[in-house]
Image: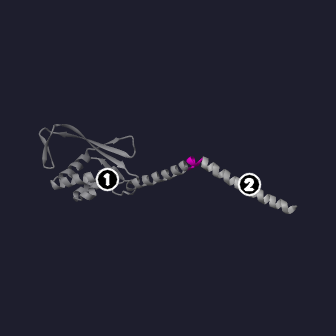
Amino acid sequence: MGEDKKIFWKHWTGVLVMVAIAGLVVFLLANLGEVINAVQKKYLAQKERQQLEELQRPYKEDKYGGKTPEETFDLFITALKKEDIDLASKYFVIPKQESWKETLGEYEKNGLLANFYVELEQSREKWQKKQTGNPDIIEFNEYVMVDSGSKLKFKDKEFDVPAGNYLNITRFEKYPSGIWKISVL
């Protein structure tokens, strides 16, 4: 009779294991949508995190700039004095670098680069620091008085500049790498 009990328990143990597996399969099938959604959410979150890291990489790795806005501005002016347009444009925030490279190239082509950096040096002497409420953004303001009859030449065109008092704003942004970049000039 001992042998019969062993066979009985082996048989029912196998049946119980099969019932448990069947119950698990039924549970998974009933909750398959939720399981798939959870897996997809994790996959999409990981993919978004990777894309965000890829977008942030240039900002984290950028080394063109100073530890202060003033230092960045000095580096920018030094590059202009050396007529290194490529380097000078790298002191701007990344989205504006190509545009400034073109603009500085036009200044150089029209013989205005020296006048430009002299004007910037003079402007810096009159800067008034303005807090923006964001520790990663600093502005410097300067008021400029323009006399009547002033003209501005750019890209072979001459423009009349109305007389008046104008506000020049120079804005800097601090990058995740700890350096400051010019965002508005």
**What is the crowding at mark 1: few (fewer than 14 residues within 10 Å), some, or many (at least 20)?**
many
Q: Looking at the image, which residue is at 67% across and 52% down?
A: 22
Query: Given the image, on which type of amino acid does mark 1 rest?
Result: Thr
In the image, farthest residue toward the top: 164
Q: Amino acid at mark 2?
A: Leu
Residue appearing at x 74%, y 58% in the figure = 14
Residue 109, image quadrant: bottom left
Q: Is residue 158 left or right of residue 80?
A: left
Classify residue 11 as left or right of residue 107.
right
Distance CA(mark 2)–CA(mark 1): 74 Å
- Residue appearing at x 55%, y 49% in the figure: 38
Taking 134 as reference, is 94 above or below it? below
Question: Which is closer to the viewer, label 2 or label 1?
Answer: 2
Name the residue nearer the viewer: 5 or 103: 5
Which stretch did the figure color magenta?
Answer: 31-35
Asked whether 155 falls inside the magenta stretch, the response is: no
Please name whichever residue, 100 or 69, is drawn nearer the observer in this view of the structure.
100
**Is residue 33 located in the magenta-colored stretch of the structure?**
yes
For label 1, the residue is: 72
